[in-house]
Image: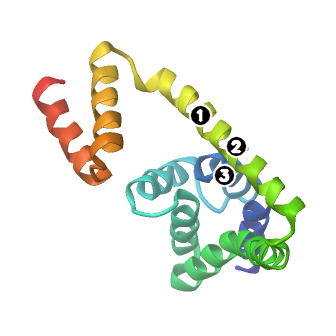
Amino acid sequence: MFYMFITFVKVGLFSFGGGYSILAMLQQEIVTNHQWLSADEFANIIAISQMTPGPIAINAATFIGYERYGILGSILCTFGVILPSSIVMVVLTKTYLTLQNKLWFQHIFKDLRLLSIGLIAAAMVLIGKSSFPDLFSVIVFIIAFYAGWRWKISPIYMLIGAAIVGMIFG
């Protein structure tokens, strides 16, 4: 059980880019290196992790730990995968609170905001290529974007509306 905890700490420490980028590393560690689960069991757990509310990496860690060692395994694997990012966030928060009034630090954050907008735009372009297979999808996107921006409609209502439109017209 200790090795599984260490494996999830390693996965949490060395995987960047969000939950889906962690899946390849998880499969390598869990299925290939340690054979804790079969490829089919791993695929099933990932499917469940995607359907369950919350971050996929944490859900997967929870389910994999439970599958292998029950509740204690679930707790250890979940804690292992979030531990590295929690430590980094504490250090970054402490640093931010210490330096937030420095002019040079404020300039860095101004540039980081621009960088984050660029990263979001890049992700939107990459996802957009597969998300807009036809003109209907583009029209639904434009209407939802405009409604959210102009009238500040809740994303929940937009999801429900898009689902209804998709069932009727899609």
Q: Nearer the viewer, residue 41 or 14?
A: 14
Q: Is residue 72 above or below residue 81?
A: below
Residue type pointed to by label 2:
Leu
Residue 121 got which mark?
Answer: 1
| Few, some or many residues within 10 Å of mark 1 (<14, 14–19, 20+) | few
* Residue 15 spot, x, y in % from top left: 74, 54
Residue shown at the point (28%, 39%) measured from the top left:
147
Distance in Å between CA atoms under marks 2 and 3? 26 Å
Asked whether, in this view, residue 50 is left or right of residue 115, the answer is: left
Residue type pointed to by label 1:
Ala
**Could you tell me which secondary element the residue under label 2 belongs to?**
helix
Residue that carries the numbered disc 2 in the rendered image: 114
Q: Nearer the viewer, residue 105 or 35?
A: 105
Q: Nearer the viewer, residue 152 or 129?
A: 152
Residue shown at the point (64%, 80%) measured from the top left:
76
- Ranked by sequence position, the earlier of labels 1 and 2 is 2
- Ranked by sequence position, the earlier of labels 2 and 3 is 3
Is residue 47 among the parts visible in the rendering? Answer: yes
